[in-house]
Image (cartoon, rainbow, N blue to C red):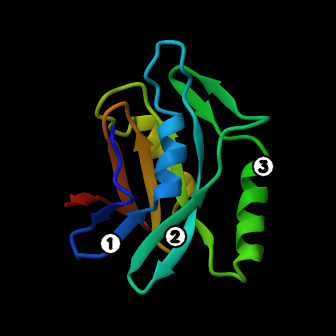
Amino acid sequence: MEFEKELTYQDSNGHLVVLTEHVLAVLEKYRQTRRQDNEAAGILLGEKRGQHIVITDLSEPGKGDLRKRNLVDRRGKHHQQKVDDCFQLSGGTVNYLGEWHTHPEDFPKPSQKDRTSWSVHLKGGTPKIVLIVGIKDFWIEKMNGTSSFKLSFCQ
């Protein structure tokens, strides 16, 4: 998967979600291209700019996380520490925006387990972004309460 400097997606209302170059470079490291590669997960951080979202940072897998070929559980305390640090260093402009994880498939789609987890953990409040990193493509969706919308790639 070759990345531009950033990738931009939009929802059905034309609201944009931008993945910055830094975020794309980190996600690239965790693609499951080999049989021995385990799933990886983290959280997405960034800013809301009006109705648009810019994802500028993320947490990476680390100590305490459970990682298997077809299973990941983000358990490490470092994920929350990353949220706290980014929020503080940015003066409150960088916040938690959602979650990411990988799947060992070319064109990923959320599993029923993914959907159940998202509906339990990401309900209410402001819209959240969920991102699945596949071998050749991303699945990216905006969750807003009980509704969710797959985002379209903007060329």
Residue where numbered disc 2 is placed? 124
* Disc ID at residue 16: 1
The Cα–Cα distance between marks 1 and 3, rounded to whole angstroms, is: 29 Å
Quadrant occupied by the C terminus: bottom left
Residue toward you, 1 or 129: 1
Q: Residue at x 46, y 70 (%)?
A: 54
Q: Residue at x 77, y 66 (%)?
A: 85
Indicate which label's residue lies in the foreground, 2 or 3. 3
Give how far across and how far down residue 93 sits, in percent.
63, 81
N-terminal label among 2 and 3: 3
Residue where numbered disc 3 is placed? 78
Q: Residue at x 28, y 34 (%)?
A: 107
Residue 146 in view, yes or no: no
The Cα–Cα distance between marks 1 and 2, rounded to whole angstroms, is: 20 Å
Name the residue type under label 3. His
Q: How crowded is the residue under tag 3: few (<14 C-alpha within 10 Å), some, or many (20+)?
A: some
Asked where in the image residue 50 lies, by quadrant, the reply is bottom left
**SS state under label 2:** loop
Q: Residue at x 38, y 60 (%)?
A: 6
Give how far across and how far down residue 144 sits, in percent.
41, 68
Give how far across and how far down residue 110 sits, in percent.
37, 40
**SS state under label 1:** strand
In-image side of 63 versus 114 (left or right): right
In-image side of 74 versus 98 (left or right): right
Pointers 2 and 3 in contact (C-beta within 8 Å): no
Residue toward you, 129 or 58: 58
Above/below status of 30 relative to 54: above
N-terminal label among 1 and 3: 1
The Cα–Cα distance between marks 2 and 3, rounded to whole angstroms, is: 24 Å
Name the residue type under label 1. Leu
